[in-house]
Image (tube, rainbow, N blue to C red):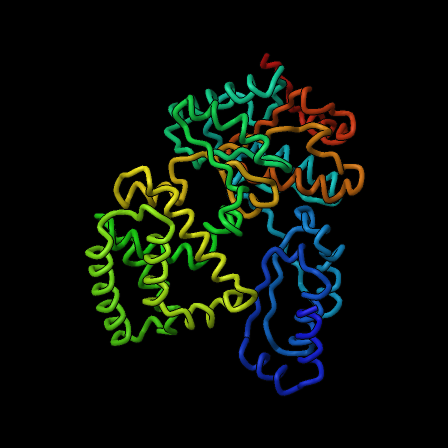
Amino acid sequence: MIGRLAELLLRVNPMARDALRLTYSHLFMDEFQDTTQIQYDLVRTIFFGTDTTITAVGDNKQQIMRWAMAMDDPFAAFDADFAGKRTPLYNNYRSSPELVRIQHILAQALDARAVEPISKTAITIAGDSCAIWDFSTPEVEAARLAAFVASEMKTHDLGPRDFVLLVRQKAADYAAVLEPAFNAAGIPLRNEAGAVGAVMLQELLAEEVSELAVVILRLAMTKRAGRYWTECQEALATLHGITPDDEAARSRLAHELDTYTLKLCKTHPTPPKSKAAARMIIDDIIAFVGKDRLIAVHPAYGQGGWLEKVLDAAAVHLSAWSVSGGDWSTALDAYEGVHAVPLMTIHKSKGLEYHSVIFVGLDDGAWWSFANDQIEATAGFFVAFTRSKQRVVFTYCARRGARSKIATLYGLLEKAGVRTFSMT
């Protein structure tokens, strides 16, 4: 309703609409395939018939938001209204040639006219780039996956966050079995689809205010913090509206940042041991940054109490990883999950990439709604596959469900030559 109201106000108020048109000479819209009709109508009302340069980037084969009212084909509407010139992107800089080959077969199931991309990444692993692993029980599955990740980390000199475990839904149910096995292998597993306060963990980690708080804490509390100095400077310059060539303003900002971080380190030499102590630190950082500046640059923080929810979640999360002792560097590593393998849903993996993707639970139980919308479900399957740089593993356990309802997906993998291995 808010989107519709905003579009109506701009449509009946030419002065407000023209102010926006004069403000933006260029408009860039990413993930355009998931645009809703309300969002599209708002853009059209503002920019239709103007000289604004508009770029829409996306891929209908990765449309996984139809359940949230995404348009069937926003690109067709864009072409008709803005005389769009299509520029296909053929080079794939993420996935190895073998994965790109398999991806193309999946892509053709969504678009028969899909052109096979060209991989610009060398393969660095031995063995199958993609496989299906059949397990007798979820417990055996968990143990074997943990051992596999541990071995791959050692063989290829990888870190925990070079891997991801993806599930379709109910991440907590999978985590309950997987976490003990990964912990036993010395590799923490973290359910990033879980909630921290009123915010999902992965959302919290991606929130601008959370990222800014962490980088300021790392600058203040850790040694060899040169990288964080640069990140803080750029983030604060953006909030203050300081341009790159305003040397005097940047010099003042650098002095203020130096003074503040020294004070922060002296006041809080050790990580907080309670949520209240953590919230005090978070609030102090927000006071330094400027709440009004945050809201001005990130308008979502001015709506519906979202900023308060994020700050509260940040305090909960920070205190949770500080109570066990250790220094600030250890606590902040834990906050960001630097040393943990992430477990998340397909939808939350969008836009991310990993050396190896392990998709747990390719069965009818997880994909119970497959028949209701095969196009979106197959697109979700495609999105999960395309997160990987080098290897994709699908796991199946008969105890969780059969695979007759999703025979289409197995048929695509079989067509691509993906082999199945019994891991019992």
Residue 120: x percent and y percent?
51, 41
Q: Quadrant of residue 31?
A: bottom right
Quadrant (top left, top right, bottom left, bottom right) of the N terminus: bottom right
> 300 or 312: nearer the eye?
312
Q: Residue at x 38, y 50 (%)?
A: 275
Quadrant (top left, top right, bottom left, bottom right) of the C terminus: top right
Number of numbered discs visible in the structure rendering? 0
User: Extreme top residue here?
Assistant: 424
Residue 279: x percent and y percent?
37, 56
User: Extreme bottom residue here?
Assistant: 15
Residue 228: x percent and y percent?
30, 54
State whether residue 85 is above or below residue 394.
below
Residue 132: x percent and y percent?
62, 23
> 70 or 366: nearer the eye?
366
Q: Quadrant of residue 334?
A: top left
User: Extreme right residue here?
Assistant: 372
Q: Residue at x 41, y 40 (%)?
A: 337
State whether residue 85 is above or below residue 241.
above
In the image: residue 26, left or right of residue 169: left
State whether residue 119 is above or below residue 210.
above
